[in-house]
Structure formats: C-alpha cells, structure tokens
Image (cartoon, rainbow, N blue to C red):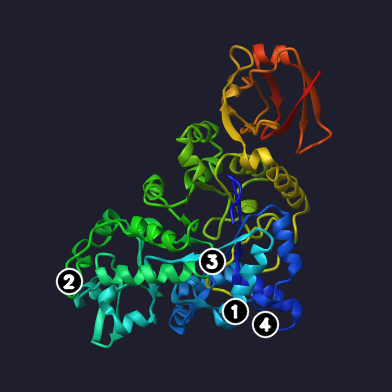
Amino acid sequence: MTGPRYSALYQINTRAWLHELGATLGRPATLEDVSDASIDQLAADGFHWVWLLGIWQTGDAGRQVSLNQPEWQAEYRELLPDFTADDVCGSPFAIRDYVVNRDFGGPRALERFRKRLADRGVRLMLDFVPNHTALDHPWAREHPEFYVRGAEGDLAREPLNYCRVVTDRGPLVLAHGRDPYFPGWPDTLQVNYRHAGLRQAMLGVLESIADQCDGVRCDMAMLVLPDVIARTWGDRALPADGSPPVDEPFWPAATARVRRRRPGFVFMAEAYWDLEWTLQQQGFDYTYDKRLYDHLHAQDARAVRGHLTADPEYQRRSARFLENHDEPRAAAAFPPAVHEAAGVLAFFVPGLRFVHEGQRSGRRLRASNHLCRRAPEPIDQILSAYYRRLLACLRRPEVRDGDWALLDARPAWDGNPTWERFIAFSWDDGSRRLLVAVNYGPTQGQCYVSLPHTDLEGHGLLLRDLMNPTTTYERRGDDLAARGLYLDMRAWGYHLFEMTARG
C-alpha cells in the first residue's frame, strides 16, 4: 500500500474511544465493535493513517502506581471531577507486553480492525516505547541485566529515580525510566541500550510489532541515542553483568532490520531538543515538529517563516501538529482566530499532517493517560465547520502530491511594517495551483507577495478562496507578474486561493 507524498494521520486515544463506544452500547466495547461507518468516515475525511494510542497490555503494577500518586490524583480531579478508582487504568506507556490489551479484544480484533482500515486505503500505526518497560514486565524478573542498575546509596539519595525490585536473582535496585530533565516515571523501569542482550530483545519486540501494523510511533525516541544515555546515566549504564558495553546507535540497525522484513514500514519519532534531523538520518520517516508548534503558539510570524526555510527533506519528514496527547488542547491553547490561522500554517506546509482526536470538535480538556474515561464536552460548531473545510482542502491533489514553495512578501508601501507578519506559499501539481496567505499577527496588515509562476502575462487570473467560496477576485496576470499580489488582510486572516487562468 502506498500513499500520497504528504499524508494525514489521525491519533485516537484507544481506551477513552472504546469506553465511550461501550457507553452507547451498554456494555464494554472492543475494536470489533467499531462500526464500518466510523472507519468509512476516517477515510472520507482524508486520513491515510490511524494511530491507536495505548493499544498494548499494561499490568496491575502500573495501575497501582497510577492509583496512589497524589499529584496524579489532583490532575484526575481537575480533568474528570467525578473520577473513581474504577476509572484508573494505568499509563499506556508502562507496557507489560506488546500484545493487544485483552480489554480491546486481543490480537484477533486488531487484525480485523487493521484489515478494515486497509480495505479503505488507511494504514495503522501503533506505539513502541523504547526507553522503559512496566514494573511488572517479565524481563524485570527474568533478565534484570537488561535494566540500568543502581545501588542502595542511589535509592537513598534519589528515591524518585530508583526502586527495589524482586528478581530471580534476588532483590535489586533498578532505575525508573526517565529523561535527563525530570524525575523518573515511577511506574516504569529504565532499559539499558548499552547491554547487547537488551538490544537484541528490543529488536525482536519491534519485529513483533511490525507484524501487527504498518508503522510505529516511537515514544521519546531521542532518549536511546548514545549521547543522551551518557548524559542521563553515565557509568550507571555500564552492563551490571560485566558484558562489553555497546555504544553504537540503536535506530539505524532497528529501522533497517524491520524494513528488510517489512518494506515500506514507517517509523515516526517523538523527538525534542533539536535532535529531529539526527533521528531522520538514523532511519525515521517522520519526527515531531515541536519547533513549529512552539513558534505558532508564541504567535511569532518571523520565527514561523524562518522555520519554513529549513532543508526541504527535513520538512517533508516533519510531523506538523497543533495538539497531541502531551500538549494542551488547541482550542484551549490558541484563541479562536489564532487557532484557525495556525491550522492553515501547520497543515498546508510539507510534512505529515497530524490531527488529534477531539481537536476538530473543539475539546478543551486533555484526557489523562492514566484514566479510561474523559469528561464529555459540547461540540464547538464553528471550529468543527472550520476543520471540515480545512480537511476538504487537504484532500486536493496539489496539496497531497504537488510542489510547495515559500513565497517572498514585501512592504505594501514605505514605512508599513505589517508585511513582516505575512507568510505565503504556493502548491502546484502542473494542472492545479493553490496560493496560501496568512496574516499571522494581531492587527490588519498589507503586503505584496511575489508569485513563482512564469506564465501569468497575457492572462487574467481568478482567485477563489476555498475556505470562503463566496470570496473571489479577478486580477490581471501582467500586473501580478510585475508587482506581485497585493494583500490587505484582517488580523489572523488567511486565504487559500485556487488560482485559475482566464482568457
């Protein structure tokens, strides 16, 4: 199965999604209960990928941690005021086994769900959590050498980063999974990529995942880079069993090995700290573009435009988003007018268009990863209509498979600085042209935009705004070729112009 040059991905919180489906059915729901009509709609909306977050089997140890962390309970009450212990399921990132959670119907249900997606031209993405396992993962008892080992002194000094674990070799102090900037995640154990046996075991896990889906989203993928391991763990990552330490990068071997068996298998990295390019070079098809999100959220048009001058291949392999399960909901983080302008900029540039379940209906509350239920919220009809129009535009051939170009803006007249807030670009597939322009700023602005087309002279040009089809303009091609397109736009205004030659 192949897709367009620029695909769209839809992330689903599996546990909350099925819980809500079960509420309508009056019984627990599995993937078998998802209707064909629901899958038809995902395909009709133009999504080429569905990412089912949290599909794997978790354990009771993780759930007990989730139940008993006071700061997490405070978040539960904030997000779900009537939560009870029955709502706590444990983090989907504290994985006990890479087998489909029994609550979701098990492997057969996933296999059938994947086939139903494939029948509609949609591919399935699942999670891989490379940095850590659940506390009660079988390796903790059977292969403690696979984990970063601590000592009693570490446990005494850093009780948030270490714990005592009962193993087949007796009680040992092992490290919680963590990144170097925060305390450990108390429901996890940190695996050790400097141990050759662990690396081989993780390659086997990846191969088993690849048998069940078409791509993986790799959680905190940069944490297993050798320099990050060294910065986080130092000598603690020396294999405790005395075996020779391995310091080669894991990802090049992992991505190559999986693709030998599964050509076309896709890897997407959750990535931060300006390590996106590094991970792309190590085999990732896509990496999170948190920088673009941050610039959009800061309402910094100059930074957005500068970011879009990056290497074209880097941009093609960037996953663009306005929210995901780790970020605030876009409807809460962006004022309404800014939200719409930011959506145009995030999703009409090259890369993977990454939309989170609930984003289109205007959900404002994040769902806790530790809960199986989320608070009901009304649909924001204005935002919902905006996303319907946006997704319709994203289904256009020139936006999926055409050539993209960032355009130059210049002052409309001397002394007018508002041109600096304009971001404009074009899409062209040889037969269709689209011009996108956004005034990403808080006041009315004016500019001229230079067009890249060489065949404008001698023709008229009709500009029809696809996001507002009643808005059309006619312009002389000779004038556009000589001076560019004059724009006078409201604060946070945007146009998606279909460009058609006339005469």
> Label for residue 28?
4
Q: Earlier in the sequence, mark 3 or mark 1?
A: 1
Q: How many circles with numbers are drawn on the protein? A: 4
Tell me the SS state at disc 3: loop
Q: Is residue 191 visible?
A: no
> Which residue is denoted by mark 3 in the rendering?
213
> How far separated are the C-alphas under marks 4 and 1?
17 Å
Task: Tell me where residue 219 appears, x and y as whole percent.
Answer: 44, 61
Q: Which residue is mark 2?
A: 243
Disc 4 from disc 3: Cα separation: 24 Å
The picture places residue 188, in percent across and down from the top left corner, at 38, 73
Left or right: where 366 falls relative to 497: left
Q: Nearer the viewer, mark 4 or mark 3?
A: 3
Would residue 368 appear left or right of 238 to someone viewing this image?
Answer: right
Q: Amino acid at mark 2?
A: Ser
What amino acid type should be assigned to the residue bearing mark 4?
Pro
3D distance between C-alphas at marks 1 and 2: 40 Å
